[in-house]
Amino acid sequence: MSTATFFNPTNSSLEAKIKAAKGILQSVQMLEASQQHIQANGPDSALGTEEELSTANTLTCNSFNDMVNALSLLELQQAHTEKLLSLDEYNLLMTEKQKANLQEAHRAQLSYESTHSKDRNR
């Protein structure tokens, strides 16, 4: 089952990936601003139903995760060197990429341990 996302670079070039990534980062900022507005002014001030806002949140999170997974550490470094990313964008994306890498390594370790503990119990 695939998840809905709007991280869709027009091609595989670094420039296209970064342009799509910047769109995702802008969406994250807009979603955060919307959530702050609702907290400050109450749910009746929302531009959309609770279900629509939940869907927007899910879509934005899926897109952000796809973006982080699609960009390599090397691509992020290159994008920063080529001034395609600001320092703030670079730092945010590097942090998220490193978190994703750690989570993947942890999942792999748990899977390995689970598989091998079953072998020992036989």
Image: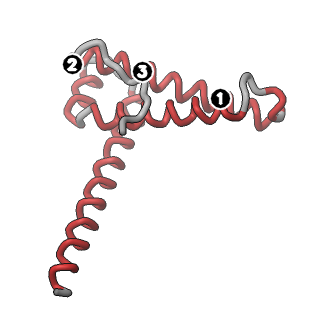
The residue pinned by badge 3 equals 22
Q: What is the residue that sits farthest to the top in this orientation?
A: 10
CA distance separating discs 1 and 3: 23 Å
Inspect the image, locate mark 1, and give the three-letter code of the amino acid beneath it: Glu
Horizontal and vertical percent position of residue 7: 38, 24
Q: Earlier in the sequence, mark 2 or mark 3?
A: 2
Name which residue lies at 60% across and 24% down: 30
Frontmost of labels 2 and 3 is: 2
| In the image: residue 85, left or right of residue 114 | right
Q: Quadrant of the C terminus?
A: bottom left
Q: CA distance from mark 1 to mark 2?
A: 31 Å
> Marks 2/3: CA distance?
15 Å
Q: Mark 2: few, some, or many residues within 10 Å (few <14, many ≥20)?
A: few
Residue at position x 39%, y 28% from top? 87
Numbered circle sitting on residue 100: none
Q: Residue at x 29, y 25 (%)?
A: 80
In the rendered view, tell whether residue 103 sits above or below residue 97. Answer: below
Q: Which amino acid type is marked by label 3?
A: Lys
User: At numbered mark 2, what does the secondary structure look like: helix, strand or loop?
Assistant: loop
Say which of 83 and 66 sits in front.
Answer: 66
For the residue labelled by badge 3, is the local secondary structure a helix, a strand or a loop?
Answer: helix
Left or right side of 41 for 48: left
Q: Residues within 10 Å of mark 3 (few under 14, many from 20)?
A: some
Image coords of residue 114 (percent x, y): 25, 72
Q: What is the three-letter code of the residue carrying label 2?
A: Ser
Circle on res. 12: 2
The earlier-in-sequence mark between 1 and 2 is 2
Q: For label 1, count other residues whose C-alpha is less than 10 Å away and answer few (under 14), some (14-19) or many (20+).
A: few
The residue lying toward the viewer, choosing from 78 and 49, is 49
The quarter holding residue 96 reads: top left
**Residue 109 vertical position relative to residue 22 in the rendered view, above or below:** below
